[in-house]
Image: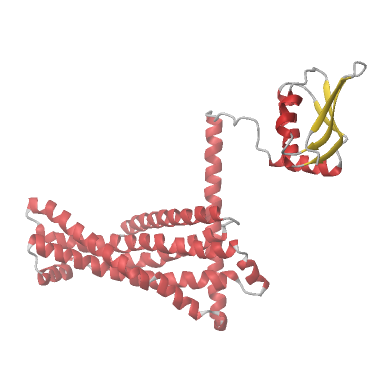
Amino acid sequence: MQTAIDLDISDQADTDKVVARLRGRMTVETVTALLPRLLSVQSERRIDLDLGDVTRVDTAGGWLLCTLERQFAQDGRELRIVNAGPDVQAIIESVRNAMPDAAPPPGADRSIRARLDALGRSVSAGVGFFLELTGYLGIIVHRLFRTLRHPRTFRLTALVAHCEDVGLRAVPIVALMAFLIGVVLAFQGSAQLRQFGAEVFVVDLIAISILRELGILLTAIIVAGRTASAFTAAIGSMKMREEIDAMRTLGLDPPTVLFLPRVLALLLMLPILGLIANLMGLLGGALMAWIDLGISPMMFQTRLLEGTDISHLFVGMIKAPVFAMIIGIVGCHAGMRVGGNAESLGRMTSNAVVTAIFAVIVADALFSIFFAQVGL
């Protein structure tokens, strides 16, 4: 089999071009030796590269031709490829589209106009993302009302399974977290209040902090880390394997089958997890207050009932459904944005966790401002 390639250069003085004729095979075995020979052609006139006698061209040969075009263009010379068959032209075009941009990336524009442009694009992307989440909220609400009108379409087994995964399996980590938070609050609070002889007010500190803010907030953050990532991974994997398209082909509605049971499971289980967190936080605070300050459990209970209004518990529990909706919508939305590769799945899973936690903290801050304004 012929593996060599011949190069014949003819300088046509009566024309404005130099013709370089190739004979043989432009394959991976020959391009290494051929490239410097072609680059060494010295001519300020146009160079025609004649491929009429080339018997075969593979992708390595296509790379050689595309590299020559770029190099000659950088040197200010003109290179034309002539007498190339349709197959050769197709290979050249495919390689040309696949090759990276040879031009160096432009330096960052640090002008005021560029900064304003970047800021505007970021704001526009943020607004678009918020509108997408709002659209998913509308889809879930619509499917919920449609399911209430047609109860037989609802998948109770899926709801129970998601309740177990979202709620029951999260109880140990939520309970441990809340217990330790109560211990830390009691320990740090007693160290400060002891200076003023007001150790007994550590009960109020623990109760208000846990019932009003920390109990439900930290529970939502833990659930966001567990559940938003799980929702994104599950739905994203189905999207990668085109299972969601198959569901639509079978007449199944993905929001009803995938989104609704997950969001309802969060709506049911997050308030329960919040109550468990409140109970364990108070238990941890009572234990540390007993050990560090000598406040007996009965005294802790008496001070808790006398000095803590039930409204603090209601303020915390009102946040739970909102946090649940945020976590569920962000997780489902991120899952549907997964592309066709594993890299996209990992990126969207990380984005879902970060977005859900950030949104929960922002919502908690807005709740705090609202309750402060209304006097609760």
Look at the image and tell me in which quarter the C terminus lies: bottom left
Please tell me which residue lies in front, 199 or 71.
Answer: 71
Based on the displayed image, in which of its 4 quarters is residue 277 positioned? bottom left
18 over 271 or under it: above or below: above
* Residue 310 in sight from this viewpoint: no
Residue drawn 26% across the image and 67% down it: 278
Question: Which residue sits furthest right?
Answer: 14
Residue drawn 72% across the image and 39% down it: 28
Left or right of 54 on screen, residue 239: left
* Residue 79 in sight from this viewpoint: yes
Q: Position of residue 374 (x, y in %)?
A: 33, 60
Q: Position of residue 320 (x, y in %)?
A: 37, 66
Q: What colour scheme has been applied to the protein in the rendered image?
A: secondary structure
Left or right of 340 on screen, residue 227: left
Q: Position of residue 189 (x, y in %)?
A: 16, 55
Based on the displayed image, in which of its 4 quarters is residue 161 positioned? bottom left
Q: Position of residue 78 (x, y in %)?
A: 79, 24
Based on the displayed image, in which of its 4 quarters is residue 253 positioned? bottom right
Question: Which residue sits furthest top?
Answer: 13
Residue drawn 74% across the image and 34% down it: 30
Look at the image and tell me in which quarter the N terminus lies: top right
Please tell me which residue lies in front, 347 or 268.
Answer: 347
Left or right of 277 on screen, residue 246: right
Question: Which residue sits furthest bottom?
Answer: 152
Figure disc tally: 0
115 over 277 or under it: above or below: above
